[in-house]
Image (cartoon, grey):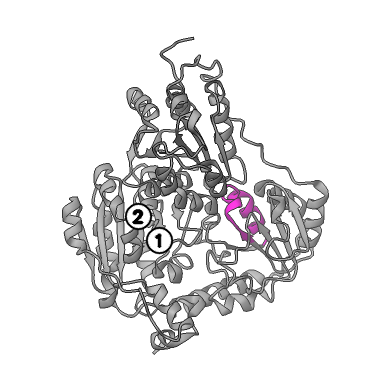
């Protein structure tokens, strides 16, 4: 055994062999051996975030845009706990994040002995936040645990996986694993659906005159299969985490305008005689806590058997991989589909009217989606926080052309936008990234602006500044009889902040100038900061779930 080769060396060596090129983290007492080994090899880009929460969001967005592992290093205890919000979001989004954290020395673990950073029950905390959590309990098992964790993160349904490596084991000498150089991660194969289930689904859909697809996150890698069904006459709609699976300039997709907040779409669903839901939970957040009326004949396909009946009842459940399900159904429908010849024209007309109706509710912001889309290159990445601008139009009507170019907080948390933008921009490798954040969300992660200054990604951060928590104001108007509390923010002068960070700064003070100013910002090589003065532009549009409630909503309509 080479006494100079340690578990920390293994960590540094195994990541490039897993296809990893970039890692995020903060150095601390309980991860120094691993990060030292990474530094000595200089084979990985190390992005030094300013907080573990930001680093976790960066790794998440990196995974979404790259389609591969996002890797995060944290220290034990408080450092690990700071990453929990980002790991929770990665779990919501189904992102393959590998979180490697230190742990106190083996002899002290879970004893509540007061050693530095010691948190009894750390593994349980990580297990609650992640798809899985593992602890390396001996130096010789480190290789196997890391392989299993990475493979599990990348196996459907994807999600974050944490690995704890105690500080004494990081320094422990081991033999360099024989399987390291020829490493192939044992990622679970795509689950083939049962032929009988495919036959049953095809029989229902063959008789449908007006069929639709609902595409979710689990179908992100199944765009070609979805297009096969659309070529047979299907219309489509997407969950917000499944947008761009079908490019949203395709005339037969509604994109993210899936009915919640769009009466015309809801009305149209009443004419649809069969809907195939693929890789989507039909989440309560997107369906108005399941009040959205979907077609009565609902076929649900998912690789997770527990999705069966979890939210909406279905006529049939098909257990299998999204692409294999749609390919199998398309094979069976070829030459047998009986779609109404007028369905396509009806769909296209409804789509245009529904979009126009929705844009008309946005007041002075109605032109923002098209103006921003025109400024951002087609392959540019659209990142957004849970700001009111996103809840009203960013998730719904901003056109998306590829699922890897759209990132948002699926868990609806405020604050991840800037960090998500950093991770997305680094994964985009030179393609422009635009991150839309609210002033409230920006305040939560403002420290990461100096990660932007240090790393210089091609990221334009657009701060929608309305002087407070716009969504909260409207909710308080609706549910607290108009009493508003804790919603106004004192935020820094953004021009001064940009100057402090050494970033180019731009300001948008009118709706008419949004496209022009953003084009200037996007033309900058590297990062830039843009402020949108919402109080100068006009009243924010109503947040859809509360659009017809409360005094503020009434004022917004006047």
Of residues 141 and 289, which is closer to you in this image? 141
- What residue is pinned by disc 2? 418
- Which of 326 and 339 lies nearest the eye of the viewer? 326
Q: Position of residue 558 (x, y in %)?
A: 39, 90
Q: Which mark is residue 385?
A: 1
Who's the residue at 68% across and 50% down the image?
Answer: 304
Label 2, label 1: how far apart the Cα atoms are: 8 Å
User: What secondary structure is found at the residue carrying circle 2?
Assistant: helix
Of the pair 376 and 491, the residue shown nearer to us: 491
Q: Main secondary structure of the magenta part?
A: helix
Q: Position of residue 78 (x, y in %)?
A: 40, 45
Compared to 399, does 104 lie above or below? above
Decide if residue 527 is on the left or right side of residue 101: left
Q: Residue at x 59, y 57 (%)?
A: 216
| Residue 89 can be seen, yes or no | yes
Q: Are marks 2 and 1 in contact (CB under 8 Å)?
A: yes
* Membership of 478 in magenta stretch: no
Image quarter for residue 468?
bottom left
346 vs 556, left or right, is right
Residue 231 falls within the magenta-colored stretch:
yes
Residue 546 drawn above or below residue 307: below
- Which residues are drawn in magenta? 214-233
Residue 350 on image: x %, y %: 57, 75
Name the outermost residue toward the front. Answer: 113
Instruction: Name the residue nearer the viewer: 136 or 237.
Output: 136
Image point (22%, 66%), residue name: 507
Q: Quadrant of residue 233?
A: bottom right
Compared to 114, does 377 lie above or below?
A: below
Q: Which mark is residue 236?
A: none
- Circle 1 SS class: loop
């Amino acid at each position: 055994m080479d006494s100079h080769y340690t578990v920390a060396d293994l960590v540094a060596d195994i990541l490039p062999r897993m296809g990893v090129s970039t890692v995020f983290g903060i150095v601390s007492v309980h991860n120094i051996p691993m990060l030292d080994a990474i530094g000595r090899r200089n084979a990985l880009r190390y992005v030094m975030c300013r907080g573990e929460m930001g680093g976790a969001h960066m790794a998440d967005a990196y995974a979404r845009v790259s389609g591969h592992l996002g890797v995060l290093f944290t220290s034990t205890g408080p450092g690990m706990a700071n990453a929990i919000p980002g790991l929770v979001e990665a779990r919501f989004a189904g992102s393959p994040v590998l979180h490697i954290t230190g742990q106190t020395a083996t002899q002290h673990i879970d004893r509540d002995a007061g050693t530095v950073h010691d948190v009894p029950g750390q593994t349980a905390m990580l297990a609650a936040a992640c798809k899985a959590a593992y602890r390396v309990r001996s130096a010789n098992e480190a290789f196997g645990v890391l392989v299993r964790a990475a493979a599990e993160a990348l196996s459907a349904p994807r999600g974050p996986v944490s690995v704890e490596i105690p500080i004494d084991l990081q320094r422990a000498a081991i033999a360099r694993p024989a399987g390291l150089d020829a490493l192939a991660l044992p990622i679970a194969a795509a689950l083939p659906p049962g032929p009988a289930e495919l036959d049953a689904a095809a029989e229902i859909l063959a008789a449908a005159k007006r069929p639709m697809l609902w595409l979710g996150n689990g179908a992100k890698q199944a765009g070609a299969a979805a297009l096969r069904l659309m070529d047979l006459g299907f219309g489509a709609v997407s969950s917000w985490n499944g947008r761009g699976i079908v490019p949203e300039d395709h005339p037969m997709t509604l994109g993210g305008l899936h009915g919640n907040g769009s009466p015309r779409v809801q009305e149209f669903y009443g004419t649809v005689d069969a809907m195939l839901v693929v890789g989507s939970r039909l989440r309560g957040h997107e369906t108005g806590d399941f009040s959205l009326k979907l077609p009565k004949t609902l076929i649900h396909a998912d690789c997770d058997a527990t999705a069966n009946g979890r939210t909406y009842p279905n006529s049939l459940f098909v257990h299998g991989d999204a692409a294999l399900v749609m390919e199998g159904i398309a094979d069976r429908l070829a030459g047998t589909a009986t779609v109404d010849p007028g369905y396509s024209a009806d769909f296209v007309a409804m789509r245009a009217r529904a979009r126009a109706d929705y844009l008309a509710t946005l007041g002075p912001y109605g032109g923002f989606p098209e103006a921003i889309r025109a400024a951002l290159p087609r392959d540019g990445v659209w990142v957004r926080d849970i700001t009111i601008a996103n809840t009203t139009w960013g998730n719904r009507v901003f056109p998306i052309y590829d699922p890897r170019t759209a990132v948002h907080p699926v868990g609806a948390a405020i604050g991840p936008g800037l960090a998500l933008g950093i991770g997305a921009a680094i994964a985009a490798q030179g393609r422009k990234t635009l991150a839309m954040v609210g002033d409230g969300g920006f305040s939560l992660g403002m420290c990461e602006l100096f990660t932007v200054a240090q790393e210089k990604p091609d990221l334009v951060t657009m701060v929608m500044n309305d002087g407070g928590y716009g969504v909260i104001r409207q909710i308080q108007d609706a549910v607290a009889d108009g009493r508003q509390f804790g919603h106004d923010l004192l935020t820094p002068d953004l021009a001064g902040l940009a100057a402090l960070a050494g970033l180019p700064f731009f300001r948008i003070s009118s709706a008419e100038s949004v496209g022009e100013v953003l084009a200037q910002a996007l033309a900058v090589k590297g990062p830039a900061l843009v402020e949108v003065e919402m109080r100068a532009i006009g009243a924010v549009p109503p947040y859809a779930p509360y659009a017809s409630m409360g005094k503020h909503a009434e004022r917004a309509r006047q």
